Amino acid sequence: VSATVVVGETVTYHELVEPLGVFDDAACASHSLTLPAARGTASRRVVVSAHLDSAHEFRPFALLGTASIPVLIYGAVEPLVAMVALALGAAFRGCKGLSGRIRWTMAAVTVFTLPFFLFFLGDYVVGASDNLSSVAVLGQLARTLSAERASGALSADAEMVLLATSGEEAGLRGAKRYVEEHAASLLAIDTSVIVLEQCYEASTLKLTPGEVFTNAWHSPWLGAVLTEAAAEAAAEKTSPDYGPLPAAVLPFGATDATPFTHAGVAAAVLSCAPYDRMPPNYHTKLDTADLVEEEALLRMLDVTTRAVVKLSHGGGRRESSEASVDETSEGRAEL
């Protein structure tokens, strides 16, 4: 039972503990600011989202850094290993000493997972890079889009929604509730969602085409719009040029884009953090604002603004839903 709950909540992001009342309304909340279409009824909508909440301090990350990753993986599979050990012990009961050796081996290895008993006992962290930095970008984006609307750069037929969610660190609950409550309106008109996630290192700006844990594979055409926006920003030198926008699948964890993608809404993730190594001070009290590069904020803002302007005019949208489905399948095959 414990293994099912742990894997279900932290790996596949299913909600299994709701009957226990663990999460209050604040963990499932969201706040939005809407810039309505200038011509009244919107024909398309662009949503830009970032999560407000920060995590409890991850004690193993603070103690072990990147080395905590294999420990975390072992902690997740340990219940399964224990069951196998007990089964072998029962099956080979006639083999003297085997079951005892298995038990002692399990006990020895378990010592390395003891820090995870303190996993959620730390205070809430500052969360500067995850994800207050992206919230700051979202705030500046509100000012930027107001100026773009005044200059006529934004389409008068498009509605802009700036969304700040809670509960991302608690199973994406804020984004899930938002999608559940607004499913009809999200699907009623052409809607694109850009999720801003972890912004602190300018050189690592990337597109996240998919997420392994939640089996969420995001919109290829929307990713192409972001890639084009990044190329234009580099060519016009309005933000630092680190070459073409790379794409990297999120190997563990999940983002608020998952509920949108699963609901059939076009979504994409823009991140300024490495996936091949542990970000410095990730989910610890040392994740402070001085670690966030100003260039990272500017680059994410620049690329996002350009993409939103394109999307407001319907840029990148595939002509047929069938073609979009084919493209998604091709993108997943390539990954």
Image: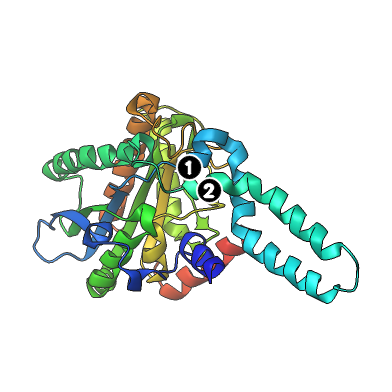
- The x, y position of residue 184, in whole percent, is 24, 75
Between circles 1 and 2, the one closer to the viewer is 2
Q: Is residue 242 left or right of residue 159?
A: right
Q: Is residue 77 left or right of residue 117?
A: right
Point 55% across, 59% down: residue: 212
Quadrant of residue 160 in the image? bottom left
Instruction: State the count of labels.
Output: 2
Q: Going by the picture, which residue comes out furthest to the right?
A: 95
Q: Is residue 292 left or right of residue 109?
A: left
In the image, residue 335 above or below residue 291: below
Query: CA gap, disc 1 to disc 2?
Result: 31 Å
| Near-viewer residue (205 or 59) | 59
Q: Is residue 70 visible?
A: no
| Near-viewer residue (89 or 1) | 89
Marks 2 and 1: in contact by CB < 8 Å?
no
State the residue position of label 1.
206
Q: Secondary structure at mark 2?
A: helix
| Near-viewer residue (247 or 320) | 247
- The x, y position of residue 329, in whole percent, is 56, 68
Quadrant of residue 26 in the image? bottom left
Q: What's the amino acid at mark 1?
A: Lys
Q: Earlier in the sequence, mark 1 or mark 2?
A: 2
Q: What's the amino acid at mark 2?
A: Phe
Q: Is residue 156 visible?
A: yes
State the residue position of label 2.
116
Characterize the local packing of mark 2: few (<14), some (14-19) or many (20 or more) Cα atoms within 10 angstroms. Answer: some
Point 25% across, 62% down: residue: 24
Characterize the local packing of mark 1: few (<14), some (14-19) or many (20 or more) Cα atoms within 10 angstroms. Answer: many
Point 80% across, 69% down: residue: 89
- The x, y position of residue 133, in whole percent, is 32, 36
- Which of the image's four quarters has the C terminus? bottom right
